[in-house]
Amino acid sequence: MGLDLRADPIALTAALVDIPSESRHERRIADEIEAALRVQAPHFEVIRNGDAVLARTHLGRPSRVLLAGHTDTVPVADNLPSRVEDGLMYGCGTSDMKSGDAVFLHLAATLAEPTHDITLVMYDCEEIESSANGLGRIERELPDWLTADVAILGEPSGGFIEAGCQGTIRVVVSAAGTRAHSARSWLGDNAIHKLGAVLDRLSRYAARSVDIDGCVYREGLSAVRIDGGIAGNVIPDAASVTVNFRFAPDRSIDQAVAHVYEVFDGLNVSLEVTDAAAGALPGLTNPAAASLVAAAGGQVRAKYGWTDVSRFAALGIAAVNYGPGDPNLAHKVDEHVDIAAITATTDMLRAYLTA
Ligand SMILES: [Zn+2]
């Protein structure tokens, strides 16, 4: 017996969880999802790409909503098969994110007259290095499958619509000096001492909070590493602080870098950017996204970490995380999902997709 997409999404969550699918081992779960969609969602065009399954309607609606979920999990930690206890379903992938997948698959098979066209993307390899990410592969090989007005990722979001995400850059702030024996310190120039001014700027730094489309993003500029020193009797000629700037998505990477240069302006140090990832604007003002926010009763908050939402934002598509799981439980041995949240998420999305 294969997957029953029309069954209660709670039962469907359990069925998906009980198919082990650690990253790079998603063939079986993809086979089962593909077979079920072909039979149980006949109004969808279904294709396969590697171990991803894609399906979409062609109803001629004025807008398209893309529902995306990864089918892989982190390695099982002796926590399969799933079990339900006191209204909680335990097991690897219950929260991150097979409960979200189950909601999407159930809606695809049961929504007779959606008011938006729907694209469903069930993809592989989200939990490992980003070069293997199935969504990235689909973007390269099947870009027309990723056109939509709104993208909803079923990642655990605790019942909130989590929109956009902050950007991040890492900058190494280096000071140079002159090496000398510490017994004759006046012959040297101490690079570590010069970092005092850098740390002083950091501790006095007032971070912004920025409200964009009702989501508040809290920035942070933090020292995350410090390097320096040669030996117990040597004045060091080099020292550095690595600074991480988490910035609101109203700044571009270039603007974020310029801001960090400004913060350390006038100090005798050099700066090098070693890592950068752009943020994503929430984009909740477009009508299809605004009605999603309304359907969720305005339960919207900013997303702080970097997720696949950013891929859609880079494509100019409003994208949010919205799934029944709890983000604090992802990847934990006692990972679980509140089964009432699976029902609530299903009801909310059904209302949105048929309003
Ligand atoms: Zn996830």
Image (tube, helix red, strand yellow):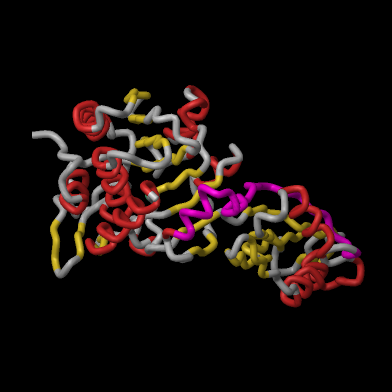
Q: Residue at x 51, y 26 (%)?
A: 143
Q: Residue at x 52, y 51 (%)?
A: 289
Q: Residue at x 64, y 66 (%)?
A: 211
Q: Is residue 244 visible?
A: no
Q: How many marks?
A: 0
Q: Provide residue 242's location: percent of width, then percent of height.
A: 68, 59
Q: Residue furthest left?
A: 1
Depth check: 181 or 299 in front? 299
Residue range (magenta):
266-294
Q: Is residue 250 visible?
A: yes
Q: Provide residue 235's location: percent of width, then percent of height.
A: 80, 66
Compared across the picture, whether 315 is left or right of 170 comes to left
Depth check: 168 or 279 in front? 279
Residue 55, image quadrant: top left
Residue 326, image quadrant: bottom left
Question: Is residue 158 found inside the magenta-colored segment of the image?
Answer: no
Depth check: 308 or 343 in front? 343
Compared across the picture, whether 20 is left or right of 226 comes to left
Q: Provide residue 182's location: percent of width, then percent of height.
A: 81, 70
Q: Is residue 352 shown above or below 84?
A: above
Question: Which quarter of the image is occupied by the N terminus?
Answer: top left
Depth check: 163 or 94 in front? 163
Compared across the picture, whether 283 is left or right of 31 comes to right
Q: Provide residue 52's location: percent of width, then percent of height.
A: 35, 30
